[in-house]
């Protein structure tokens, strides 16, 4: 195999530099000048709506697609690029497919040991089956397994070859809700336990937030924002990220005189994420529903318009009166034990933790251009 | 329904899983099933009266040899058809072969050439007085041998495998093959260790169609003077030893059932599920093998389409020059269209009740009725004809000896084609539609007539078209059952080809081939969806 885990210890596990890919017969690129580095031993999720290029990126890394431009390195070895091409089977990659793609004509141990040779084979199969908690299932056929078990077998098969990186193509989308939550935790435990570098593709923000060390939000073939799950959720840099990862309220305002608050129609809101813009700059801020807390003493007053009880919380739409008789509808999360009815007058306050200035807000084009680029933070 | 009959009504309802059918519907469907199964059942029944001595003599003298000649032929033809069909399907579905869409069409075309027509053209080219001998002075191949028969049969039956395997390949998506790539297998190893094993159910289904065809074929083996069960049965009947014919038929029926059961068992063991959605993929690059692949497909197409069609066109030209297209020829065509058209209409009328009962009133009884209706389909035409002769002489003397007998034979042989087509259409109509019609005040039969029939009309019509074409091509039952002096196109092809009067046979054969091309597009689409 061309690529081994220890090829160049200091190199990123995966490095994409200026990678572009346009499918024949289409005009818009599926992946557009993408540059991305993934550190060894981390779990990264490529997150975005369908058509954002996340799956194409994954298939480019796997070698099922050839980039039109740019280069891809795995553990310091160039596997795709000008004059360089390493076939998928020689890249040292493991992959877990959307529908698992277990070989239906082989039992569990043969699936896991597929293309392993020699005396090592049985030992390795037993080892990875133990890691995924399926030691007693070696003789079962794939169709005799539950969805979660099939997924573990798919992971065991990918791990058996000691890959440089394991790729996951929407692995949770075929599981039902309960199993999904369970398998997310289980996968994370196994992957961190084995120190595996993993790249997930997902369109589901809750999967991405739960499993990742790092999230790369993609849109139209480009990276929209990358960062830890907390950064992505608390401080979305763009309107797209704010909307796609959880729902949010967008308000216009100006950076306050102290440079750590925003003057809005709701009053001054404390904000820890202002991109160091100078006071007075017109901006758009994202205020997560979680940072609006019902509080009888709160400064903002509104009337409940709509409520949805979800069990974990109450999602309420509150109509707030602004200056000059205008109103705005805000999404507010209430604790589920609170009793709220439509038409209730409520008061609430804004917590600073989930308030972020949006870089591409349309409050003023000039202000946006002044924004510092979204620097990757850890 | 009165209260006193409740216990019986309760049992009745339970047998139909709470959905007992309208009794007229049940009656019509049962009648159809009985007519379909009667000839075959009657053949088996009559064989019981053949006497122990006749059975013993045939089992000792005839049957072992026939078993060997028939089974060895079926095995070799199936193996060759599998090799050609799977290789061609893989090349078309998975590689960067130029003109893949066109090849999908071209390679299915041999289905439009009835194998006995194909056999005739091979005699013209490779026969003792054939073109090759004329050109070269000696023919390197002899079609009147086991190899010749097997080759001709394989050349015109491999499309069954090609279509079934091609549909399986294009449906199954690429996830398994990509998974194997990530596990370190190169393209060829993926083909051997993943693609082909996953194709096993499709290969079983396609191989079954080929094997069943070989068991039932009469025209090719008879023209090329090879003896299998079908030709032996035919010649026994010609010698008026009909009881011996029933014995041989019973053995052949048993053989057919064994093959059907074996394939079904194999499929149950290997039930593969592939659900991943197909997405655009990078085809396997053939590289320098491209010309080899193109050459292979070219040879297959040349031998199974170009050669027979060229021969037919050449001899048709000779025939036309001699004024073959006269009033007699028109009469043959008219006869053919009449009986085939009547059979198509009868099948369209009979198919819907049976499939409706099966779809909307599932029960052991409706499944059994449907199976019965398939009896004549899987079995050779000579057996259907034999059964109909017995049955007709005894119970339908006013029909026997008339063209109506041919129509009945075609219905028995080809109704399942109309049933499959109507059933596929009916599956698209939700049972909620029936319920809505009932709520609007229609009686069960009125629902079928006024709602279901119009909705399934495209499928029923397509089924009728298939039956029409199959009936045009049908040879063995037509030979055995036609009224004296009643000639169809297929009969003319057969008679003139037997006399080596190819300029008389070719025009009729060309008409048959031209009609057979028509339903091909529809068949290809169906394999695509299946």
Image (tube, coloured by chain):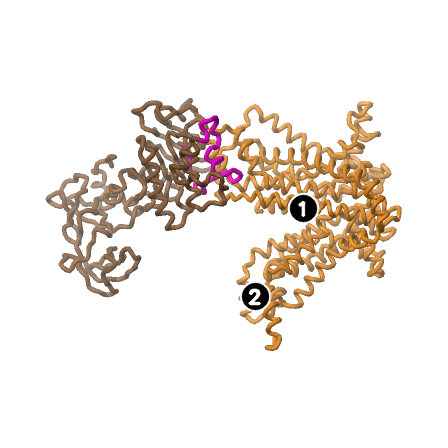
Chain colours: A brown, B orange
Whole-angstrom CA distance, mark 2 to mark 1, is 32 Å
Residue at 56%, 68% in the rendered image: B438
Our reading of the magenta stretch's main secondary structure is loop
For image coordinates 41% across by 39% down, the residue present is A169
Mark 2 or 1, nearer chain start? 2
Side of A149 relative to B188 (left or right): left
Q: Residues within 10 Å of mark 2 (few under 14, many from 20)?
A: some
Task: Report the residue at 56% width, 67% height from top.
Answer: B437
- Quarter assignment of residue A193: top left
Stretch of the chain drawn in magenta: A94-122
- As rendered, which of B291 and B162 lies closer to the eye? B162
Q: Which mark is residue B18?
A: 2
Question: Tag 1's secondary structure?
Answer: helix
**Relative to residue B147, is residue B37 depicted above or below?**
below
- Between B199 and B122, the residue placed more toward the observer is B199
Q: Would you say the residues marked 2 and 1 are in contact, meaning their CB atoms lie under 8 Å apart?
A: no
Q: Residue B275, how many percent across, how many down?
A: 49, 44
Chain designation of label 2:
B
- SS state under label 2: loop
B462 vs A203, nearest the viewer:
A203
How far across and how far down the image is residue B335, in percent?
80, 52
Q: Residues within 10 Å of mark 1 (few under 14, many from 20)?
A: some
Residue B131, position as x, y percentages in the image: 80, 29
Look at the image and tell me whether residue B493 can be seen.
no
Residue at the extreme left of the image, as rendered: A258
Question: Seen from this angle, which residue lies furthest right?
Answer: B239
Foreground residue among A156 and A216:
A156
Vertical position of residue B431 compared to residue B309: above or below = below
Residue that label 1 marks: B260
| Residue A97 is one of the magenta-drawn residues | yes
């Amino acid at each position: 195999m061309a690529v081994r885990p220890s090829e160049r210890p200091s190199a990123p596990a995966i490095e994409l530099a200026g990678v572009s890919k346009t499918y024949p017969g289409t005009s818009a690129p599926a992946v557009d000048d993408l540059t991305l580095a993934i550190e060894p031993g981390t779990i990264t999720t490529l997150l975005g709506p369908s058509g954002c290029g996340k799956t194409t990126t994954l298939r480019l890394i796997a070698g099922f697609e050839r980039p039109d431009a740019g280069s891809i390195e795995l553990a310091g070895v160039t596997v795709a690029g000008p004059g360089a091409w390493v076939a998928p089977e020689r890249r040292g990659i493991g992959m877990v497919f959307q529908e698992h793609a277990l070989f239906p004509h082989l039992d569990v141990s043969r699936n896991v040991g597929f293309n392993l040779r020699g005396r090592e084979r049985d030992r390795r199969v037993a080892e990875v089956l133990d890691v995924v908690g399926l030691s007693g299932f070696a003789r079962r056929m794939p169709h005799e397994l539950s969805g979660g078990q099939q997924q573990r077998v798919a992971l065991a098969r990918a791990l058996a070859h000691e890959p440089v990186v394991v790729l996951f193509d929407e692995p949770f989308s075929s599981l039902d809700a309960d199993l999904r939550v369970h398998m997310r935790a289980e996968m994370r435990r196994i992957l961190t336990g084995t120190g595996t570098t993993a790249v997930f593709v997902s369109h589901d923000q809750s999967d991405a937030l739960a499993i990742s060390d790092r999230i790369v939000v993609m849109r139209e073939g480009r990276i929209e924002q990358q960062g830890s799950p907390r950064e992505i959720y608390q401080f979305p840099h763009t309107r797209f990220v704010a909307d796609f990862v959880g729902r949010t309220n967008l308000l216009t305002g100006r950076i306050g005189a102290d440079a750590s608050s925003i003057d809005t129609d709701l009053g001054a809101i404390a904000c820890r994420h202002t991109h160091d813009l100078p006071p007075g700059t017109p901006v758009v801020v994202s205020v997560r529903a979680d940072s609006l807390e019902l509080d009888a003493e709160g400064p903002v007053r509104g009337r409940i318009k709509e409520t949805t009880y979800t069990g974990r919380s109450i999602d309420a739409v509150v109509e707030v009166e602004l200056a000059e008789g205008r109103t705005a509808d805000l999404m507010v999360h209430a604790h589920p034990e609170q009793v709220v009815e439509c038409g209730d007058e409520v008061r609430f306050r804004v917590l600073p933790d989930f308030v972020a200035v949006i870089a591409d807000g349309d409050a003023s084009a000039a202000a946006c251009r002044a924004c510092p680029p979204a620097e990757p933070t850890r | 329904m009165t209260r006193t009959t409740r216990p019986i009504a309760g049992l009745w309802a339970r047998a139909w899983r709470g959905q007992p059918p309208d009794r007229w519907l049940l009656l019509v469907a049962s009648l159809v099933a009985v007519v379909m199964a009667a000839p075959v059942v009657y053949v088996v029944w009559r064989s019981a009266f053949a006497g122990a001595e006749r059975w013993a003599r045939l089992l000792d003298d005839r049957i072992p040899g026939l078993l060997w000649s028939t089974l060895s032929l079926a095995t070799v033809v199936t193996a060759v058809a599998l090799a050609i069909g799977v290789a061609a399907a893989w090349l078309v579905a998975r590689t960067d072969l130029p003109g893949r869409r066109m090849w999908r069409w071209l390679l299915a075309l041999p289905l439009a050439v009835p194998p006995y027509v194909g056999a005739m053209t091979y005699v013209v080219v490779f026969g003792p007085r054939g073109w090759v001998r004329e050109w070269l002075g000696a023919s390197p191949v002899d079609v009147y041998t086991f190899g010749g028969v097997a080759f001709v049969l394989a050349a015109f039956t491999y499309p069954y495998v090609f279509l079934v395997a091609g549909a399986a390949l294009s449906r199954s998506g690429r996830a398994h093959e990509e998974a194997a790539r990530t596990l370190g297998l190169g393209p060829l190893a993926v083909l051997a260790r993943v693609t082909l094993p996953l194709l096993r159910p499709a290969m079983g289904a396609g191989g079954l169609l080929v094997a069943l065809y070989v068991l039932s074929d009469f025209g090719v083996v008879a023209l090329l003077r090879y003896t299998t069960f079908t030709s032996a049965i035919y010649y026994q009947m010609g010698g008026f030893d009909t009881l011996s014919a029933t014995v041989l038929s019973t053995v052949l029926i048993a053989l057919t059932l064994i093959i059907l059961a074996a394939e079904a068992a194999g499929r149950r063991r290997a039930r593969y599920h592939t659900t991943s959605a197909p997405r655009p993929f990078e085809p396997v690059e053939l590289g320098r093998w491209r010309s080899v692949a193109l050459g292979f497909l070219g040879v297959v197409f040349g031998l199974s389409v170009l050669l027979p069609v060229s021969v037919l066109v050449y001899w048709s030209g000779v025939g036309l020059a001699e004024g073959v297209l006269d009033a007699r020829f028109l009469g043959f065509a008219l006869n053919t269209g009449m009986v085939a058209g009547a059979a198509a209409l009868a099948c369209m009328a009979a198919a819907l009740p049976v499939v409706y009962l099966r779809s909307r009133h599932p029960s052991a009884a409706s499944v059994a009725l449907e199976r019965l209706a398939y009896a004549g389909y899987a079995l050779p035409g000579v057996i259907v004809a034999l059964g109909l002769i017995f049955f007709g002489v005894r119970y339908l003397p006013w029909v026997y000896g008339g063209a109506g007998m041919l129509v009945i034979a075609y219905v028995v042989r080809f109704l399942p084609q109309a049933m499959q087509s109507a059933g596929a259409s009916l599956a698209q109509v939700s049972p909620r539609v029936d319920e809505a019609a009932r709520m609007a005040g229609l009686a069960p039969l009125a629902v079928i007539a006024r709602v279901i029939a119009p909705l399934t009309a495209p499928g029923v019509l397509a089924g009728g078209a298939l039956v029409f074409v199959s009936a045009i091509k049908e040879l063995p039952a037509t030979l055995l059952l036609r009224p004296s002096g009643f000639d169809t196109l297929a009969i003319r092809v057969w008679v003139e080809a037997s006399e080596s009067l190819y300029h008389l046979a070719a025009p009729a054969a060309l008409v048959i081939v031209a009609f057979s091309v028509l339903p091909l597009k529809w068949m290809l689409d169906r394999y695509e969806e299946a």
